[in-house]
């Protein structure tokens, strides 16, 4: 999609993301210091500080800055998004879920600390995410903070991440799974947390209802795009590396966009999603909206 890439070339997304990730890593390190009982703190920090692209915190801060807020207002919520994301990865990797051995290039939390500690580290990160927003957010009216907490709660629970995960588990090995279920799973497992990150940043920065609704639509499209591109990369990577490691798409009997739509239609769908995402941003100051435009491109055109 060369056209779309060139449009956001003037903005240096790489430097932006690197600067935000650095600030977020410092804030996360400070938010969860080592203390008694060391075992749980070590397990929490092991996954939380294990790298990761920090896309959700960057989205939260970028949305806050877009509507007139600043990084400091959004930082506790940005960190909370990463805590929730990390705990969902820890639990997703458990033997009773995906049973994975590696995450972010390191042994998964339960491989490093045992299953019991990994469950508790996830629980502790989830609880702390909400505590951290409530305690550490400063300079913002309390009703905005309350709204952010409620929004994130919905994004995590049985209308959000948990809903996506349970439908995903239930549809494993089911060859009748169609586009509707596939979209439900991706929207709930991925898009709702990206949306919560963006909407929270916007609320904290004092966005209008119209701005919040546009940013929410932007994030939902970007979230689904993330997964469509993931499915496409699984196919293109596995044919490029044939004989080395087959993409998980070919290994597991699970529905993907290329399987249901074919590669060409999946690519067209991805293009439609990025167009819809960017359309939502057309009313904002184009200079200020560059980070969110760039993040959409980054998710669409990444190579892994
Ligand atoms: C939330 C209470 C609660 C339980 C967890 C396990 C579960 C319920 C949900 C699964 C959520 C899940 C693992 C979704 C996939 C999300 C996703 C797109 C992960 C990859 O994100 P990146 O690429 O990863 O941003 P990095 O490592 O860069 O942060």
Image (cartoon, helix red, strand yellow):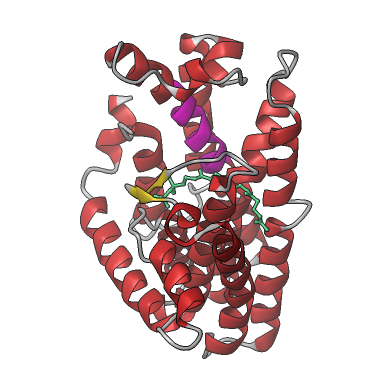
The N terminus lies in which quarter of the figure?
A: top left
Residue 286 visible here: no
Residue 7 at x, y percent in the picture: 29, 38
Q: Is residue 249 above or below residue 71?
A: above
Question: In the image, residue 224 lies at what x, y percent?
Answer: 56, 36
Where is residue 80 drawn, in percent x and y? 53, 70
Instruction: Answer with left or right where residue 300 lies relative to residue 125.
Output: left
The quarter of the picture where the C terminus appears is top left
The x, y position of residue 20, in whole percent, is: 32, 66
Residue 203 in view here: yes
Residue 170 falls left or right of residue 228: right
As drawn, 211 above or below 247: below
Q: Say which residue appears at 33% left-offset and 58% top-offset.
A: 51
203 w.r.t. 73: above or below: above
The quadrant holding residue 287 is bottom left
The answer to whether residue 199 is magenta is no
**Image point 48% across, 37% down: which residue?**
226
226 inside magenta stretch? yes
Q: Which residues are magenta?
A: 221-232
Front residue of this view, candidates 160 and 89:
89
Q: Quick one: 150 or 216, which is closer to the camera?
A: 150
């Amino acid at each position: 999609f060369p056209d779309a890439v060139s449009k956001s070339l003037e903005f240096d997304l790489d430097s932006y993301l690197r600067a935000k990730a650095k600030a977020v890593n410092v804030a996360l390190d400070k938010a969860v210091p080592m203390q008694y009982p060391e075992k749980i703190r070590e397990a929490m920090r092991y996954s939380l500080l294990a790298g990761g692209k920090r896309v959700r915190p960057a989205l939260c801060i970028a949305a806050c800055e877009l509507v007139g807020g600043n990084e400091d207002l959004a930082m506790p919520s940005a960190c909370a998004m990463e805590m929730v994301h990390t705990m969902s990865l820890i639990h997703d990797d458990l033997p009773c879920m995906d049973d994975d051995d590696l995450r972010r290039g390191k042994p998964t939390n339960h491989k490093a600390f045992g299953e019991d500690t990994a469950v508790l580290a996830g629980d502790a990160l989830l609880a702390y995410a909400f505590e951290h927003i409530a305690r550490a957010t400063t300079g913002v009216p309390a009703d905005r903070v309350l709204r952010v907490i409620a929004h994130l709660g919905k994004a995590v629970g049985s209308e959000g991440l948990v809903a996506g995960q349970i439908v995903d588990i239930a549809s494993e090995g089911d060859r009748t799974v169609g586009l509707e279920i596939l979209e439900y799973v991706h929207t709930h497992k991925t898009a709702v947390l990206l949306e919560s990150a963006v909407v929270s940043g916007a609320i904290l920065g004092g966005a209008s209802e119209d701005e919040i609704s546009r940013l929410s639509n932007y994030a939902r499209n970007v979230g689904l795009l993330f997964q469509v591109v993931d499915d496409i990369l699984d196919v293109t990577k596995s044919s490029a590396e044939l004989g080395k490691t087959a993409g998980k798409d070919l290994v597991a009997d699970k529905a993907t966009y290329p399987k249901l739509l074919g590669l060409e239609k999946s690519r067209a769908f991805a293009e439609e999603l990025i167009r819809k995402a960017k359309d939502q941003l057309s009313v904002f100051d184009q200079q200020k909206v560059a980070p969110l435009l760039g993040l959409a491109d980054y998710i669409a055109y990444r190579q892994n």
